[in-house]
Image (cartoon, rainbow, N blue to C red):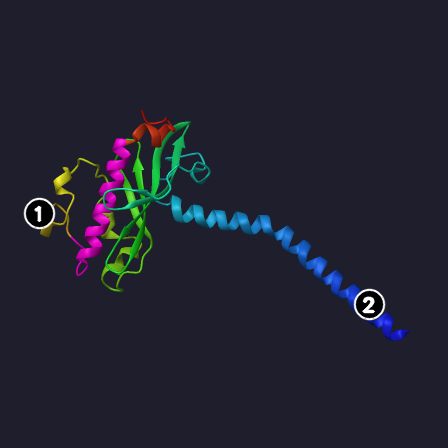
């Protein structure tokens, strides 16, 4: 009898422990989700100037999924607004670098000017193309303020390709790929401005 009682007590204690763990996990889930969302927001929204938006851009995703452009692919994006007016878009772009895919985040203001860009994922050679992941990134900052036609289309290239831009030292392929992705994103924004900023359907 005592043995059965001991077994029953162990089963009850194990059940109670499982129940406590379950309810503790359920209670913590919203906090964990909020922390994950805050971390994602810090990573994705730091390209936008302070005070340039008052919405939650991550709650306004753009209908872009694996949209193939000339040299890159748009994986998705978000719209930022202030006082109900669109102020910028964030585009996630993927382009093929020297060692594989490079995922970029590209911020463009409502006038079609590049606010900034950064690498989200990459596997380029450390010390060469891998420097694309450095933050802050002086080379990427050199593109801020540019637009689709500033400089002209044919100047959106490395100087060695008769364009306007310097390359990262020792990283020609990576530099060329990133320039192409930035220009692709600016071109797409220019051609789909109303759709990206307001959600209006293309005619």
Task: Please give left or right for residue 80 compared with residue 13 in the image.
Answer: left
Q: Which residues are magenta?
A: 167-191
Outermost residue, top side = 203
Q: Does 81 appear above or below 184?
A: above
Task: Please give left or right for residue 104 compared with residue 31 in the image.
Answer: left
Q: Does 9 appear above or below 95?
A: below
Q: How many marks?
A: 2
Task: Please give left or right for residue 51 compared with residue 113 in the image.
Answer: right
Task: Please give left or right for residue 100 compared with residue 170 in the image.
Answer: right
Residue that numbered label 2 is attached to? 9
Does the image show residue 144?
no
Determine whether the residue tagged by mark 1 lies in a helix, strand or loop: loop
Image-quadrant location for residue 10: bottom right
Q: Which mark is residue 150?
A: none
Q: Quadrant of the N terminus?
A: bottom right
Image-quadrant location for residue 16: bottom right
Tag 2: Cα neighbours inside 10 Å, few (<14), some, or many (≥20)?
few
Q: Quadrant of the C terminus?
A: top left
Outermost residue, right side = 1
Determine whether the residue tagged by mark 2 lies in a helix, strand or loop: helix
Q: Does 1 appear above or below 139?
A: below
Residue that numbered label 1 is attached to? 162
Q: Position of residue 19 (x, y in %)?
A: 72, 57
SS majority, magenta: helix
Residue at image coords 30%, 38%: 108
């Amino acid at each position: 009898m005592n043995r059965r009682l001991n077994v029953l007590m162990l089963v009850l204690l194990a059940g109670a422990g499982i129940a406590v763990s379950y309810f503790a996990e359920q209670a913590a889930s919203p906090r964990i989700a909020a922390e994950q969302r805050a971390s994602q927001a810090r990573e994705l929204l730091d390209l936008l100037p302070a005070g340039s938006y008052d919405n939650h851009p991550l709650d306004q995703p753009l209908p872009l999924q694996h949209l193939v452009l000339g040299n890159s692919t748009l994986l998705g994006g978000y719209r930022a607004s202030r006082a109900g007016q669109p102020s910028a878009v964030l585009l996630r772009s993927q382009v093929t670098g020297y060692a594989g895919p490079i995922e970029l985040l590209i911020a463009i203001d409502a006038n079609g000017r590049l606010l900034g860009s950064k690498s989200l994922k990459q596997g380029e050679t450390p010390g060469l193309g891998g420097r694309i992941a450095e933050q802050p990134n002086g080379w990427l900052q050199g593109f801020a303020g540019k637009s689709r036609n500033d400089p002209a289309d044919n100047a959106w290239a490395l100087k060695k390709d008769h364009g306007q831009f310097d390359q990262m030292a020792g990283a020609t392929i990576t530099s060329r790929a990133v320039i192409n992705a930035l220009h692709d994103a600016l071109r797409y924004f220019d051609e789909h401005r109303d759709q990206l900023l307001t959600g209006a359907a293309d005619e």
